[in-house]
Image (tube, rainbow, N blue to C red):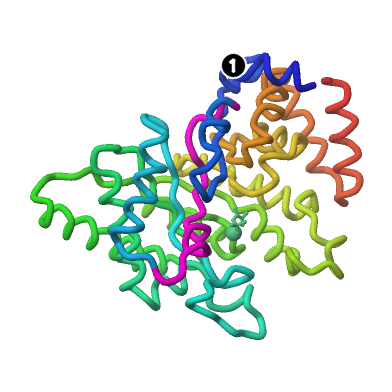
Amino acid sequence: LIEKVKAVEHLPAVTTDGRKVELQLNAGLSSGFEHSKRAGATGIGLYRTEIPFMESRSFPSEQEQSIWYYNVLSSFERQSVTMRTLDIGGDKSLPYFPIKEDNPFLGWRGIRISIDHPELFLLQVRAMIRANVGCGNLEIMLPMIASVAEVDEAVRLINQAYFELCQELNENILKPKIGIMIEVPSAIFLMKELASKVDFFSVGSNDLTQYLLAVDRNNARVAHLYDAYHPSVIRALNEIAKQSQASLVPLSLCGELAGDAAGAVLLVAMGFDKLSMNPHNVGRIKWIIRHLSIAQAKNMLGHVLTLDNAKEIKNYLNEQLESIG
Ligand code: PEP
Ligand code: MG
């Protein structure tokens, strides 16, 4: 298999009948970029900014952050780099910003913290926009969006940071695209309204699974209930794809499901434009996409949508994938 995967490294991820899918990387530190690029990905679909924050001893300054972000943006010339604003809370906390709560995954997390601490958010987006001067490939992504008002407030703050920097630097700098994660179920029912406010959607299937099924993604006792192939998750993803196509907003998925062969096939069939995954999955997913037609993938999706449990869905997809190779 390694041989087969190596042979497609420099080729695009296109189905046998010509549908192109962009494969991007999930990343958090800049080590290993060279290796990932050789795997044949085209840019970063999810840069988790909380990772460098977690490695810092205190809140990083604008200048410090700007250097991190510049290092990432400049390593991917002419390929988009989607930087997610700080997504702490839940299972991720900073040693210098502890959060104690009974229900952290339903608590102060992601965009909620950014909105309550605009000074931290402004500093971060200023650092990103500053780092993008001379690079031009930055896209900003907002985590944990559950309502339209959160997008309005975050976009207002990003615009403020942008206009301040235009004045301070005395030049017309590039305004980055702004997108949101679809990972809280309430966002699915607001996609039409959200579509008019953002440039792209990216599904966080890890959290979407956890919140749709009410199963903690890190609790071993209920781990057998946590399954992205649960029919409700698959149907929700299909609905999200339909909605984003109806509103002409590009759609990506950056959870673990994108790096899983059976998941990637379903997502391609649904019409996802981009899949973002851990570097070691890129080669295999590309190989599968290149050996499959949209007609075949849609056929599989059609059957999967009739099944009512994850076990049957996975068995069926595995059988189908074995017949492809
Ligand atoms: C997700 O929720 O699927 C996701 C990509 O983000 P994270 O795993 O960092 O929450
Ligand atoms: Mg998430």
Front position in the image: 138 or 30: 30
Q: Residue at label 1? A: 18
Which class describes the residues within 10 Å of circle 1: few (<14), some (14-19), or many (20+)? few
Q: In which quarter of the image is residue 277?
A: top right
Magenta span of residues: 39-59
| Relative to 117, residue 218 above or below | above
Quadrant for the C terminus, please: top right
Q: In this view, does 155 lie to the left or right of 224?
A: left
- In the image, ligand 1 is in what quadrant? bottom right
Front position in the image: 254 or 98: 98
Q: Element under label 1?
A: loop
Q: Where is residue 175 in the image (x, y as percent from the top left)?
A: 26, 46
Q: Position of residue 299 (x, y in %)?
A: 77, 28
Front position in the image: 242 or 46: 46
Task: Kindly identify the residue that appears in the image at 29 percent across and 48 percent down.
Answer: 131
Q: In this view, does 235 lie to the left or right of 195?
A: right
Q: Where is residue 258 in the image (x, y as percent from the top left)?
A: 66, 41
Q: In this view, does 15 lie to the left or right of 243?
A: right
Q: Residue furthest left?
A: 170
Q: What residue type is labelled 1?
A: Gly
Task: Kindly identify the residue that appears in the image at 54 percent across and 36 percent down.
Answer: 24
Task: Kindly identify the residue that appears in the image at 89 percent across and 36 percent down.
Answer: 316
Q: Does the magenta stretch include residue 45?
A: yes
Q: Does the magenta stretch include residue 172?
A: no
Quadrant for the N terminus, please: top right
| Relative to 281, residue 127 above or below | below
